[in-house]
Image (cartoon, rainbow, N blue to C red):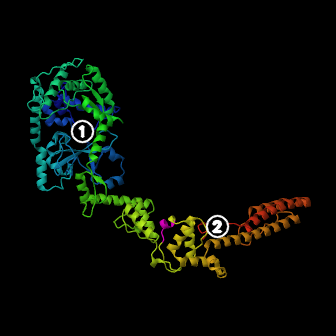
Amino acid sequence: LKTSIGPRWGAAILLAPRIQRRPSRGSSASRHVMAGVFAKAEEADVGDLFGRQGAQVLPTPVSPAWYAANERSWYGEADIAKMTKKEKQSKELIACSMTVSYAPTARAKCRRCGESIEKGSLRLGYPFRWRACEDAYTLYLHPECYVPEVFGIKEKELRSKVFGFEALNNTERAQLWRKMRGRGREAEASSESKKAADEFAKGTIGPGVDIASLPKVKVPSELVVPMLPFQREGLAWMCNQETTEVRGGILADEMGMGKTIQAISLLLSRRQKGPCLVVVPMAAVLQWVSEIERFTKPGSLRVMVYHGAQKARLATEFKKSDVVITTYQTLETDYRREMDKTRVTCKWCGKLFQPDKLKVHQRYFCGPDAQRTAKQQKTEKKFQDAAKKAMANMGITSGGSSSSSSYSPPTITNIYKDFMKEAGVELKAKGYWGIRKEVAERLQSGPTSGSRGSRGDSGGESLNREKLALMPPADLRNLCQAKGLDSIGKKADLIDRLMDFTVRGTAKLMASSSSSDGGARRHQPANASAGLGRQLLAKAKAAAKASAKAKAKAKAQAKAAAAKGKKGAAAPAARPANGSARTVASSRAAAASASSSGKGTKGAAASGKGTKRKAAEMEEEGCSAETYEGAPKDLSGSPLHT
């Protein structure tokens, strides 16, 4: 790991051990783990890191360990001690050291050699825990990278210590064991490490590049600061890279070693006809501008910052600059804007796609010939389950869905179609815009001649709330009168009345009105008897009149009891004739008469005066209920109406 600074970065990257995750600075355990890993790496030579002894930097497995196949998770001894007996039985834990399986993808990497594990090939997995407070997870190895010194599994113990070994056939078992004890990958790694060590000792990077034999490059005269030896060496290497087929490279010096100075010297040494683009983070833009001004003579490099709202105007001045500095975000924005010009519209859904993405879109997702694969159908099933759960939370039943698909997500369109279906209107269009078009056509066409049946026909003209909302109140009143409904009320009440007529039918509405009105309907005109709101208003007036009579009777009884002046509690006021409870005014009058009954005639007279005042208040209340005159109110939507 002890490498020189400068262009010999390749060996430094090659020798760096692979660490699973970057530990936090505040964790002492993590610092000890990292210190031990690097200490082992420094003690070993280049060949040992790629040989058998390279297993020293392998993360230590959890031992003993138990594997839960249904959860694909590992448990250590401390985890088992915290479990109950029932939890152990439900997880079906199996004591083992490793697992063997076929790699479903090529994303996993070997923890020893660092190479990807090919899809469909056998791989070994073992448990690892980064911290004691975290759960154990699986690290994978090539069977050829198995190290007996770490795991110590013998051939006779494969069945008991390697989960999944019994699922293999005899040929696969033999191949697995042969790879586990073989040394082919180790020999190949040893030869590669020896070659890398030789190149590192000679000071070469890549095939045929000898840094010592590279031609010396003169430090540009425009540079006002001297360059260090390793910086001049890096300048020579970068100038040589520009002449090769690679046309560039990666300068991986440590922070603060002068990478910016080397890059500026490269720009001065190899002048280009056009401007050079420098893409840096936003925080480094001003740093680059200041260092160019600081380390070069005035006028050596003309710098332009391409960023912000004025970048469209600055784009015409590129040819006047030697260095154009921009940010990653600006570069991405301009790239997306240019790529959007090449997008093509899908003829089925109207969305924009790149030509290569449009083929995939029309093959699997959109159009009459689109057919999804088995994996995509599984994804659709996942969306179906999520849609059903959302519909259950929103109180939407899937049985009333009017969509022709196997499931109906709770979208605005599907909810609208469900409500319209309940109102007796079947919408056949699909999609938001299709439904809007169908509704507009229905509104323009209006009611058909066949739907204009008789007044008592419940399956007559099909009304919908959208059409009624567009009609003026005068037309709504005329429509209510034509259908024999009450035409008094606000526009919203008229619409609700017409929708109720459409859904339930005229027969049910007339039956309910006749049962509530009794025989009085026969002595009223036809239009008046059909008004449900007027009937309810008449009922309310009759109830108010009966309540006023009951209050007057209670007042008379309370006055008589107060005049007698008997000792003890006065006779309680009689309940109203209709069985309703006593009013607050009558209760107060009774209490006043009871308190003054034992105090003689003077007290009775005083009580009588109070009773008269209460009676006057009651008369006013009764008068307001009996002599109510004004616009009739529709009480059909009242929660007290049954």
Q: Residue at x 12, y 33 (%)?
A: 193
Taking the image as drawn, is residue 597 in sight? no
- Residue 165 in the image, given as x and y percentages of width and height: 18, 52
Q: Quadrant of residue 431?
A: bottom left
Pointer 1 and pointer 2: residues touching (CB < 8 Å)? no
Residue that numbered label 2 is attached to: 633
* Mark whose residue sits in front, 1 or 2: 2
Q: CA distance from mark 1 to mark 2?
A: 83 Å
Three-letter amino acid code of the residue under disc 1: Thr
Q: Which residues are magenta?
A: 463-468
The C terminus - image quarter: bottom right
Answer above or below: position of 458 versus 412.
below
- Residue 578 in the image, given as x and y percentages of width and height: 71, 72
In the picture, the disc for residue 60 is 1
Position of 639 compared to 319: left or right?
A: right
Considering every residue shown, the one lying at the far right of the view is 601
Q: Earlier in the sequence, mark 1 or mark 2?
A: 1
Answer above or below: position of 448 versus 274.
below
Secondary structure under badge 2? loop
Secondary structure under badge 1? loop
In the picture, the disc for residue 529 is none
Taking the image as drawn, is residue 376 in sight? yes
Task: Please tell me whether the stretch drawn in magenta is mainly helix, strand or loop.
Answer: helix
Report if residue 464 lies within the magenta region. Answer: yes
Three-letter amino acid code of the residue under disc 2: Lys
